[in-house]
Image: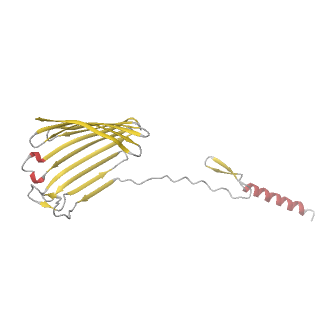
Amino acid sequence: AADSVPAAAGVASAAAAAVATAVPTATTVGAAVTPVVPGTAPAPPAVAAPVEESAREVLAIEISRGYSFDKLQPLEGGIGQPKESQLSPVTGLVRFTPSLRTNFRAQVNYSPLFGGIQSTQLTGQYSFKLGTAGVTWFTHGNPALQNSSSLSKGNQIGLTGGIAVVPGRLRLDAQVNYDIQNKLLQQDRLVLTYTSQCWGLRVEYRDFQSADFQLTHNRQHDWRFAISLKNIGDILDFGVGDTVNAPQ
C-alpha cells in the first residue's frame, strides 16, 4: 500500500502535465496574438470582411416605338407631308460599357411610314483621372423628301472634352461640331466652371453657325454668365450676344 501511493501521485502528475500541455497559451489571429484564459476554448479564426461589389451595365439593347392617342397629334408626317401616322419611328439603341472608363452608344431611328432612316448616332467616350473625351457621329434626314432635295440630309461630327484644371475647383469643357454635309464649322463652345464651398461661377462662350434652306449662313456669338449658391441654385443667369446674317 505504501508503494502504491507514490505511483498514483506520479500518474496524477503526468495527467496534469498532459492537460497543461494540451491547453494553448495564446491564439494567433492574423498578426495579433490573443491570450487564452485557462479552461476556456480558443477563439475562432477571424473571417475576412466581404468585399462590396455593385453590379453595373455592360450591354443593353432597346427597341421602342411610340403611339399617340390624340388623332390631332400624329407622331410622324403631318402638315406638308403626304402621309401621317399615330405611330412614331422605330428606335433601336445599343449601349456597350466594357469598363468604368469607356462606353459606346449607337442609335438609329427608322420610319416604316416612308421606308427610310431618319437619323443615326454613334458615340464613344473615355474618362480619365482629370477629365473626359468623346466623339459623336450624327446623321439625319427626312425620308419623305429624300429624293427631292439634298438639303433633307445631314452629316455631322462632334468632339467633346473636359479637364479639371484645379481638381475640385476649376474645370474647363469644350465642344466642337462640324457639319460635313455643308462643309461648315457649325459650333464651338467653351465652358469654364469654378466651384467653391458655398458658391459657383459659370462662364460660357458659344459660336454657332447654321445654313438654312436658302444657303444663307446665320452666325451667332453668345456669352453666358451664371452665379449659383449651394443648396439654392442659380441666383444670377444672363447672356449677351449678336447674330450676323451673311450670304455664302
Residue 54 place in picture, x, y as percent: 43, 53
Q: Would residue 49 be found to the left or right of residue 229 on screen? A: right
Viewer-proximal residue, 49 or 152? 152
**In the depicted structure, whether residue 210 falls above or below residue 62:** above
Residue 135 makes an appearance in the image: yes
Coordinates of residue 73 in the picture (x, y in percent): 17, 60
Q: Nearer the viewer, residue 203 or 19?
A: 203
Q: Is residue 99 left or right of residue 157?
A: right
Where does the image place residue 224, in percent across and percent down from the top left?
A: 28, 38
Is the C terminus in the top left, top right, bottom left or bottom right quadrant? top left
Q: Is residue 130 left or right of residue 143?
A: right
Q: Which residue shows up at 24% across the image and 47% down it?
A: 122
Q: Position of residue 199 (x, y in %)?
A: 40, 39
- Give the residue furthest to the left: 148
Q: Is residue 126 above or below residue 92?
A: above
Locate the N terminus by quadrant.
Answer: bottom right
Can you say whether 206 is above or below 30 in the image?
Answer: above
Residue sitting at 10 percent across and 40 percent down?
215
